[in-house]
């Protein structure tokens, strides 16, 4: 059997795996998607995703402009607690177009599942667990938990971050809260304890107006013991801590919803391609949540991988998927290097109390805010990733 007649195998049926399958089907490349979870389990997931403009540009042509309720992001306010200088990034430099949006994980999964069901050429094996990947010279085999063996030209690992045995040094304290913010605002506030992000919830801006509070999602990255302790604080005490961290510009939260904590494990594979197995999304890199780039980096992985496979058709004379994977790894190197380095460095830089560092970051924030020559390229990188 030639490579031309073998499908692409996708391990992992979350949003990254489903987007990859959708992009492949769109280009008439047959694929098989394997996931251990029933789709109903994913449709109950209440995580919030922050989508960049680049991610929306991938999704909207395939799912429709209104594929899910969203919280548009027009402005990103960046500041450092106790220091001068702040920056506002956003749509003012891009013709008023939202630089991103939030959506519920479950809503995105539902939209992707409907789009895949309407596309021929995608064999969805769910719920079905892959128990072994066996690489051959000219193919790759996937052994399933029911005894079946699938054969393909390439296997795509989109199963998420590998399990971590160690206790994380940091956790994200998660909560929904009401805050007097303007519709379309997202906030990144660096504190000496860790970055605190506030994102608009999908549909929240519909009820907002002058003097009204916005329902927002908080992600506060803290040392693990501190995150657990604050999760269990009385509401008034935690609201006071959040207000102190945010400073006087916004005012205190007026209500606090259910809280949770999420372990923060960072991870990056040096080599994303292992013969016919390619890792993408969280299986290739898992980022610190500062700047909200992890999911968007995975989406760019999907788009780039499919483009590389399309440019070198599996059945073309002299072409081989291994060459497409090599091209993919080379094209993704800068983006995959830049964002892990940036998201790991920013919390440490903003936590430093050294006077030269404090002065430098205050000047940098002020410069970004005042000078379009600095502000626009930075915003564009956050929207679309590192240029190739």
Image (cartoon, rainbow, N blue to C red):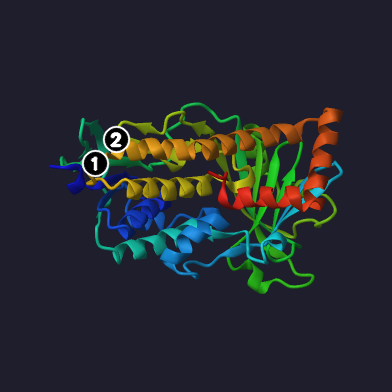
Q: Identify the residue at image location x=67%, y=49%.
A: 377
Q: Is residue 264 left or right of residue 223?
A: left
Residue at 46% from the left image edge and 40% from the top image edge: 331
Residue 6 locus on image (x, y percent):
20, 46
**How far, Cα to Cα, is label 1 from label 2?**
7 Å
- Evaluate if marks 1 and 2 touch, with contact meaning CB atoms under 8 Å apart: yes
Q: Position of residue 57 (x, y in %)?
A: 51, 60
Query: Depth check: 199 or 21 in front?
Result: 21
Which of the 4 quarters of the picture holds residue 346? top right
Left or right for 261, reference 254: left
Tell me: 387 left or right of 23. right
Q: Quadrant of residue 217?
A: bottom right
User: Mark 1, residues whose alpha carbon is within 10 Å: few (<14), some, or many (≥20)?
Assistant: many
> In the rendered picture of this protein, how many numbered marks are placed on residues?
2
- Is residue 237 depicted above or below 267 in this figure? below
| Rendered location of residue 296, percent (x, y) | 52, 49
Q: Which mark is residue 153?
A: 1
Q: Secondary structure at mark 2?
A: loop
Residue 114 seen: yes
Q: Secondary structure at mark 1?
A: loop
| Residue that numbered label 2 is attached to | 276
Q: Where does the N terminus fall, quadrant-wise?
A: top left
Give the answer, above or below, for where 334 lies relative to 98.
above
At x 76% / y 40%, what residue is drawn? Answer: 191
Badge number at residue 317: none
Which badge, 1 or 2, is on the more N-terminal residue?
1
Q: Which residue does the image show at 23% across and 48% down from the upper left?
A: 7
Image coordinates of residue 382 in percent, x first then y, are 62, 49
CA neighbours of label 2 inside 10 A, class few (<14), some (14 to 19), many (20+): many
- Name the foreground residue: 136 vs 250: 136
């Amino acid at each position: 059997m030639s490579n031309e007649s073998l499908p692409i195998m996708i391990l992992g049926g979350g949003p990254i795996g489903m987007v990859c399958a959708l992009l492949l089907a769109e280009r008439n490349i047959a694929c098989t998607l394997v996931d251990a979870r029933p789709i109903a389990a994913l449709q109950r997931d209440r995580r919030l995703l922050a989508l960049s403009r680049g991610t929306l540009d991938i999704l909207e042509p395939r799912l429709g402009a209104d594929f899910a309720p969203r919280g548009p992001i027009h402005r990103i306010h960046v500041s450092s607690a106790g220091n001068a200088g702040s920056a506002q990034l956003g749509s003012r430099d891009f013709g008023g177009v939202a630089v991103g949006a939030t959506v519920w994980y479950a809503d995105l999964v539902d939209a992707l599942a409907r789009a895949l069901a309407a596309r021929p050429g995608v064999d969805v094996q769910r719920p079905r667990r892959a128990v072994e990947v066996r690489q051959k010279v000219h193919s790759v085999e996937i052994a399933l938990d029911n005894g079946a063996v699938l054969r393909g030209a390439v296997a795509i690992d989109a199963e998420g971050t590998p399990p971590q045995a160690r206790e994380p040094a940091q956790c994200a304290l998660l909560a929904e809260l009401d805050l007097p913010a303007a519709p379309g605002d997202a906030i990144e506030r660096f504190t000496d304890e860790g970055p605190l992000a506030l994102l608009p919830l999908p549909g929240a801006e519909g009820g907002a107006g002058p003097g009204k509070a916005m329902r927002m999602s908080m992600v506060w990255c803290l040392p693990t013991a501190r995150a657990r302790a604050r999760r269990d604080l009385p509401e008034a005490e935690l609201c006071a801590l959040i207000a102190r961290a945010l400073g006087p510009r916004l005012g205190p939260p007026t209500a606090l919803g259910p809280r949770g904590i999420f372990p923060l494990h960072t991870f990056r594979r040096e080599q994303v391609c292992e013969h016919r197995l390619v890792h993408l999304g969280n299986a290739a890199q898992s980022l610190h949540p500062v700047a909200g780039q992890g999911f968007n980096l995975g989406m760019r992985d999907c788009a780039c991988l499919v483009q590389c496979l399309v440019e070198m058709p599996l059945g073309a004379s002299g072409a081989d998927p291994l060459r497409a994977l090599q091209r993919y790894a080379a094209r993704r190197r800068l983006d995959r290097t830049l964002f892990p380095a940036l998201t790991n460095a920013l919390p440490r830089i903003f936590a430093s109390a050294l006077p030269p560092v404090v002065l430098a970051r205050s000047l940098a924030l002020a410069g970004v805010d005042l000078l379009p020559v600095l502000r626009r390229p930075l915003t564009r990188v956050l929207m679309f990733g590192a240029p190739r």
